[in-house]
Image (tube, rainbow, N blue to C red):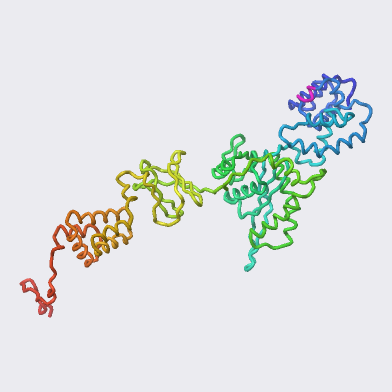
């Protein structure tokens, strides 16, 4: 290919200008060589996969060898020997810290008459492009997990009605070993997406350094070339598992070429076998997917003598970070205002939780999972409660309340009933009627304390009489007892013959004759 009339310095000049993005026509004009000759050097440079700096570091002899001035064609046996080494070389390149120079040195030690380093790299690049023309990036073990949804959906069929429901198909693939995970989910919403990502991590038994999703809303709320805004729940999930989210750039298919290639393979190796049967539930469908997936991961890779599963066990499993002890709990959020009694209401359950009283009137953020409720104000967690789903009841931490409100947590209905029973059964019955009324607990407790305190102020016997009279009225509140005691109504004696007395005579009383 090389022309002896062209100096090595001119070849370097051609490649330098080409690496800078100059057009082929301008390069030919400025260097004084024909366009076809310049294109031959550029084509060889592109096929090598090397950078201009790597080629420029070669001396003139190595550069001359690189562009094929050797008249003798390389030995076919020597090339076949090198090609047999490529599957092992490709696998070793995925290990952290291993590079082409190290593997070439090991190759030369085993085969002293083998290719020089530049030809070694040239043939390796050609082999990788031929064996796998799309997935040509070098991926390090344990580095990235690529995730996406397949464009074609699967479906579930209701056994009774025959109604068909489409379901989404989640696909994930590890960069180095290409171990693949597939799961059917009901939607692309963040709950289903995060659950599928978590199931992937437990399927592979570890955590990669980064997860690379597409720019779907469940992962990215606002795409950006440099700093995309992550979905808050997905970022929290990544923090729980100690990994990083690296969203693919919009309109850059090469960023996720690996998972897009995996989706195409999934169509032929998983979709095709599944279409022979009808599935009525996600559990049944995912069980069938898992069986087909194991066959796919155990199948030998094209041009290699190992499968995805074998490659994963050998080079990638040990490179993954360990899983945390607890699984991630998906959290929802809500913004609420702290009420005057120092509590906030979680609308999903209609349950009330206390926060420190200094936040009364402030707007705070609630993060709640199936087991916990967290309260935040300006990114600071101010309270934590176990989630309780009983409506219209309170979860109160006594330390959260002001001193004037802490009595609510010191008293219980049982304590008031015991106190009242120690005075008289009728007093206990009246207190029970107070507690049975549908009112705020704080209001009921205040009424009970006020009524029972009359035992000291007016005496137990007067309180007993007042409660008995109030029970006959059927009116149950503090004000009634107070009025009875203040007006000495507890001391009135009821006449046994009151019903037998005649009505008094009075001029203003019209009588029965008036209406005739």
> Which picture quadrant has residue 65?
top right
Left or right of 224 on screen, residue 109: right
Residue 162 within the segment the image draws in magenta:
no
Q: Where is residue 456 in the image (x, y as percent from the top left)?
A: 19, 54
Observer able to see residue 358: yes
Q: Position of residue 258 (x, y in %)?
A: 72, 43
Q: Where is residue 482 in the image (x, y as percent from the top left)?
A: 19, 57
Residue toward you, 338 or 480: 480
Left or right of 309 on screen, residue 232: left
Residue toward you, 430 or 147: 430
> Which picture quadrant has residue 506?
bottom left
| Residue shown at the point (43%, 41%) measured from the top left | 382
Observer able to see residue 252: no
Main secondary structure along the magenta-highlighted residues: helix
User: Hey, which residue is sitting farthest front in the picture?
Assistant: 422
Q: Position of residue 455 (x, y in %)?
A: 20, 56
Residue toward you, 137 or 382: 382
Q: How many numbered badges does the structure rendering display? A: 0
Quadrant in which the N terminus is drawn: top right
Quadrant in which the C terminus is drawn: bottom left
**What's the magenta region?**
53-57
Relative vertical location of residue 378 with respect to residue 397 in this rendering, above or below: above
Relative vertical location of residue 498 with respect to residue 13 in this rendering, above or below: below
User: Hey, which residue is sitting farthest right in the picture?
Assistant: 72
């Amino acid at each position: 290919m090389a022309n002896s009339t062209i100096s090595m310095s001119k070849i370097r000049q051609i490649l330098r200008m080409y690496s800078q993005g100059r057009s082929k026509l301008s390069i030919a004009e400025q260097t004084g060589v024909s366009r076809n000759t310049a294109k031959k050097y550029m084509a060889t440079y592109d096929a090598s996969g090397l950078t201009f700096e790597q080629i420029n570091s070669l001396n003139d002899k190595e550069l001359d060898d690189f562009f094929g001035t050797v008249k003798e064609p390389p030995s076919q046996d020597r090339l076949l020997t090198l090609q047999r080494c490529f599957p092992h070389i490709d696998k070793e390149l995925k290990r952290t810290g291993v590079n082409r120079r190290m593997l070439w040195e090991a190759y030369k030690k085993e085969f002293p008459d083998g290719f020089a380093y530049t030809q070694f790299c040239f043939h390796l690049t050609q082999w990788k492009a031929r064996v796998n023309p799309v997935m040509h990036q070098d991926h390090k073990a344990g580095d990235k997990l690529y995730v996406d949804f397949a464009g074609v959906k699967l479906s579930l069929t209701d056994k009774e009605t025959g109604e068909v429901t489409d379901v989404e198909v989640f696909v994930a693939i590890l960069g180095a070993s290409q171990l693949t995970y597939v799961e059917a989910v009901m939607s692309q919403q963040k709950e289903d997406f995060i659950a599928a990502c978590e199931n992937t991590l437990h399927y592979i038994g570890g955590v990669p350094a980064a997860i690379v999703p597409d720019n779907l809303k469940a992962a990215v709320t606002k795409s950006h070339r440099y700093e995309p805004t992550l979905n808050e729940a997905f970022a929290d999930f990544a923090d729980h598992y100690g990994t990083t989210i690296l969203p693919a750039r919009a309109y850059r298919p090469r960023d996720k070429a690996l998972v897009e290639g995996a989706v195409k393979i999934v169509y032929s190796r998983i979709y095709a076998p599944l279409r022979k049967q009808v599935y009525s539930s996600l559990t049944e469908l995912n069980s069938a997917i898992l069986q087909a997936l194991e066959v796919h991961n155990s199948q030998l890779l094209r041009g290699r003598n190992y499968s995805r599963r074998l490659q994963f066990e050998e080079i990638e499993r040990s490179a993954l970070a360990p899983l945390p002890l607890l699984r991630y709990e998906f959290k929802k959020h809500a913004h609420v205002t702290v009420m005057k009694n120092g509590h906030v209401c979680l609308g999903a359950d209609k349950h009330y939780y206390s926060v420190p009283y200094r936040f009364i009137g402030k707007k705070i953020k609630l993060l709640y999972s199936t087991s916990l409720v967290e309260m935040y104000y300006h990114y600071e967690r101010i309270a934590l409660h176990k989630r309780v789903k009983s409506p219209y009841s309170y979860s109160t931490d006594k330390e959260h309340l002001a001193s004037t409100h802490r009595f609510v947590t010191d008293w219980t209905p049982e304590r008031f009933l015991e106190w009242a029973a120690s005075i008289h059964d009728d007093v206990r019955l009246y207190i029970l009627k107070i507690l049975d009324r549908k009112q705020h607990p704080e209001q009921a407790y205040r009424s009970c304390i006020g009524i029972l305190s009359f035992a000291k102020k007016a005496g137990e016997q007067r309180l007993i009489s007042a409660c008995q009279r109030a029970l006959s009225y059927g009116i149950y509140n503090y004000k009634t007892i107070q009025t009875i005691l203040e007006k000495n109504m507890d001391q009135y004696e009821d006449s046994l013959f009151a019903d037998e007395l005649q009505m008094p005579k009075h001029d203003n009383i019209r009588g029965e004759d008036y209406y005739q």
